Image (cartoon, rainbow, N blue to C red):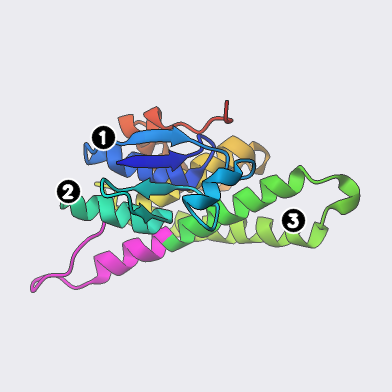
Amino acid sequence: MKLYFSPASPFARKCRIVARELEIKLEEIQVDPWTDEDFRRINPLSKIPVLILDDGSALYDSPVICDYLNELKNGHFFPRESTWRTGAGRWRSLGMQALGDGICDASVALFRESKVPEDRCNADNTVRWTAAITASLDVLERAAAKFSEHPTIGEVTAGCALGHLDFRHPHLEWRATRPALRDWFEKFSKFQSVIATRLANPA
């Protein structure tokens, strides 16, 4: 299988972490969807990541890809319901994934806005995206004490979101007022899969 990715994408990083934790070997192909017009033939939305299966079919976006990889190896990233356990674990992890993806969306948008010439910047967008990030981090801080010892897709996505904030917006200093989240992220950052997929500017 092939994974089209960018080394700066938190969404692709999530898939790469899950694949490594499940010991799934993927051929990773770096692409810039903003400049590579041919990429639209692979994903009509021209967004990464994209997973190409062995039969040539394509899966996108990151929640779908991670779910597929998890099913492939009967993994633990998406908790299942059972006769003896409610679905709370599953819905909690999916909800946290949505929150983490939302932080990533806002973080990416905020970074792109920072590259727009000053006379074309939209200050209202910057305020809105920053507020979304701040409020979402506060939710994660309150939830951090209950984070799973064995990360689900929720924790992985939250970790990727925090990593992207460190990478693109260190001035936000999110650790300063969120000690529980800070301590959790320090442990999360020691996973070999997390170390191996550190965000970087595309070559």
Q: Earlier in the sequence, mark 2 or mark 3?
A: 2
> Disc number at residue 202?
none
Q: Name the residue rendered at 55%, 44% in the picture.
A: 38
Is 29 located above or below residue 97 in the figure?
above
> Disc number at residue 25?
1
Amino acid beneath label 3: Thr
In the rendered image, which residue does mark 2 sit on? 73
Task: Using the numbered discs, state the Cα–Cα distance from disc 1 to disc 3 in whole angstroms.
Answer: 39 Å
- Region rendered in magenta: 77-97
The front one of 178 and 75 is: 75
| Mark 2, other Cα within 10 Å: few <14 / some 14–19 / many ≥20 | few
The front one of 130 and 24 is: 24
Give left or right: position of 154 versus 130: left
| Mark 1, other Cα within 10 Å: few <14 / some 14–19 / many ≥20 | few
Answer whether residue 90 is magenta in the image: yes
Amino acid beneath label 2: Lys
**Image quadrant where one finds the N terminus:** top left
**SS of the residue under disc 2:** loop
- Disc 2 and disc 3 in contact, CB within 8 angstroms: no
Amino acid beneath label 1: Lys
In the rendered image, which residue does mark 3 sit on? 126
